[in-house]
Amino acid sequence: MFSTAFLDLPALQGAAGTVMLPGSKSISNRVLLLSALCQGTTVVHDLLDSDDTRVMLAALKQLGCGVQADGTTVTITGLGGHAWPAEAIEFFMGNAGTAMRPLTAALAVQGGDFTLKGVPRMHERPIGDLVDALRELGGAIDYLGNDGFPPLRIRQPALQLDKPIPVRGDVSSQFLTALLMALPLAAGHQAITIEVVGELISKPYIEITLNLLARYGIAIERQGWERFVIPAGSRYRSPGSIHVEADASSASYFIALGAIAKGAGIRIQGVGADSIQGDIRFMDAAEQMGAKITSGPNWLEIQRGAWPLKGITLDCNHIPDAAMTLAVMALYANGPTTLTNIASWRVKETDRIVAMAAECRKLGATVEEGPDWITVHPLPQRQFPNALAKGQWQRASIHTYDDHRVAMCFSLAAFNADHIPVRIEDPKCVAKTFPDYFEALFSVAHTAAKHIPVICIDGPTASGKGTLASRVAAQLGYHYLDSGALYRVTAFAALQAGLTLEAADEAAIATLARALPVRFEGEQVLLNDVDVTDAIRSEQGGMNASKVSVLPAVRDALVQLQHSFQRLPGLLADGRDMGTVIFPDAPLKVFLTASAAQRAERRHKQLISKGISTTLDSLRADLEARDARDSSRSVAPLKAAQDALQLDNSSLSIEASVAQVLAWWQSQRD
Ligand code: DC
């Protein structure tokens, strides 16, 4: 997961490959609650691991449910047949609507002394219609803040279930879902009837609820979309085990990707056209816009069809969440796209009509909006390779409003015709439903090397390159190449193979280097799966590296391996010749220096802290000898690239050096 302040997506040019999607949020949280209300255990496979499910699991544990997690398989031991807690419990619901609403209903029907709170945004999301319905049936619920909004306090109810319970259906279908899942708790000798007031929105989510309730032994009788009857004697029965489908709303980004990006097509694993999730109908909308889609029981394959895409007008009541993706596809169309019946966007994680309009406009698009609709006009596409369509897409920093879907939608803008990178602010907000979204995107997206930024940090030994480069990499969410480690590992492997580090063995060492079985895992360096980190990091390891690094054939053999680190979304490379030889076109090159005295002192402190005894004088002599060899060798000698920026960090803190490099990078991007 990217937990950086922002993520710069390079201009992307195509996509191909297979993605496995995480489990559906809607199904995951319903299944968790239903499993909790059953007697006995339910094994839930492919559960989504996200903020929303974590909130639900934490709440269920507080209630006394057994929860055993093993990767994405979670075993729930339900509360059925057990006494519910008598003591007061306070639940923190974060911003998880799919946990807040159904839990409120279940707790209100069951009764106890419960308080439900959330983040400030949760306290702005309406729940009044659900509370009204629960009060109608005898629930004892108080608002602790503003009327109609969380936080809530729930006490012991005085249930009255003999007359139909009215619930509004035109604000959020989650209220009806909440009642449908909670009321079987109270269906003893009498049937319970729920009556929907107003036009029911988001019917497909109700279909998911009914479908899952049936899996848990509750056969709801539905009369149109107005009346729902829970038969007398209904009881939750565990299905024993259940699989969660991949999230159809998450699939929308990859369906759109297949429709937008050039390439051999995208295959989505984990959900197919026969999904029980309403958002799967997004595929019909994507097809209308031009996508070519084929499907099997548990997969979808998407290819670009019409290009540019075709602008459409669509009532999106049936696909409220996935419809946001259409708003970004609209940027790639041949005419305006109008999405109607999307009033529910206004009460989601953020006001999504405002958010989508504002961010599309930042990219340069014209957008019109109304109370429950949005029209997005396209930005010019290049229909033919040489067609002129440049200069229309604006460089933008996309604000994401703590809304996962805004972040995921706008990643698709990186395929713009002007090859302009797109900044996504607060990328970790995708954790709500798809923590590894950007990793999944990068695993199938591709672009020319010239679009993948490399920042080079070269300099002499012990100048602090490694620390600086890895810190900057962490701030930008970029990969990190410690090229010195490759020379160190090469020397280590050569000695292990019984070779000398002299010119006589140059060819043999080069052969070794060309197929070096090295892997980097965080701070660890593994050679043939053996951890050699400490062995290569020694002073002797550095000297040995310096020796093999003067051999031209060895340097040559390591070029390809170094280039392979240039992957999406970008790279920080440190070494001696990153800017001069390996990545000569890098947009930012830094040459880091510090006085020999300073460097010797830093290295001395480092070694002492590791319990290695040494003297300052001998260290300084070693450093200077290494500098001399690295700078005087005939190939790729240590020297600043002509276009490198010099940074003398003798009297700078690490933080100040990091800030300087980031400032250079930012000004270079502006
Ligand atoms: O950065 P370091 O101390 O881990 O590097 C060890 C040796 O490897 C260094 O003395 C010279 C060599 N080296 C090189 O020649 N080219 C690089 N890009 C990186 C390191």
Image (tube, rainbow, N blue to C red):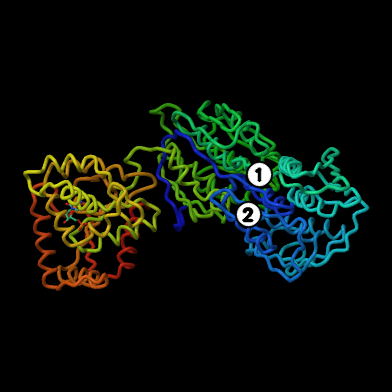
Q: Residue at x 62, y 33 (%)?
A: 285
Between residue 342 and residue 512, name the one nearer to us.
Answer: 512
- Say which element carries label 2: loop
Which element is circle 1 on?
A: strand
* Residue wearing tag 2: 349
> What whole-number distance in Å separates the C-alpha atoms at marks 2 and 1?
31 Å
Between 349 and 421, the residue placed more toward the observer is: 349
Rate crowding at label 1 as few (under 14), some (14 to 19) or many (20 or more) other CA atoms within 10 Å: some
Q: Residue 256's spot in the image, x, y percent?
A: 54, 36
Q: Is residue 40 above or below residue 271?
A: below
Q: Is residue 5 left or right of residue 557?
A: right
Q: Residue 343 placed where, x, y %?
A: 70, 47
Residue at image position (11%, 70%) is 618
Residue 161 can be seen, yes or no:
yes
Which residue, given by chain and number where applicable, does mark 1 sit on? Answer: 241
x 40%, y 40%: residue? 419
Horizontal and vertical percent position of residue 529: 31, 48
User: Does residue 38 appear to the left or right of 585 in the view shown?
Assistant: right
Q: Amino acid at mark 1?
A: Ser
Ligand 1 shows up in the quarter that is: bottom left
Residue 155 position within the rendered picture, expressed as x and y whole percent measured from the top left: 80, 67
Q: Residues within 10 Å of mark 2 (few under 14, many from 20)?
A: many
Q: Indicate which label's residue lies in the foreground, 2 or 1.
A: 1
Q: Nearer the viewer, residue 457 or 77?
A: 77
Between residue 194 and residue 68, name the one nearer to us: 68
The answer to whether marks 2 and 1 mark residues whose Cβ atoms lie closer than 8 Å is: no
Q: Is residue 361 above or below residue 280?
A: below
Residue projecting furthest to the left:
504
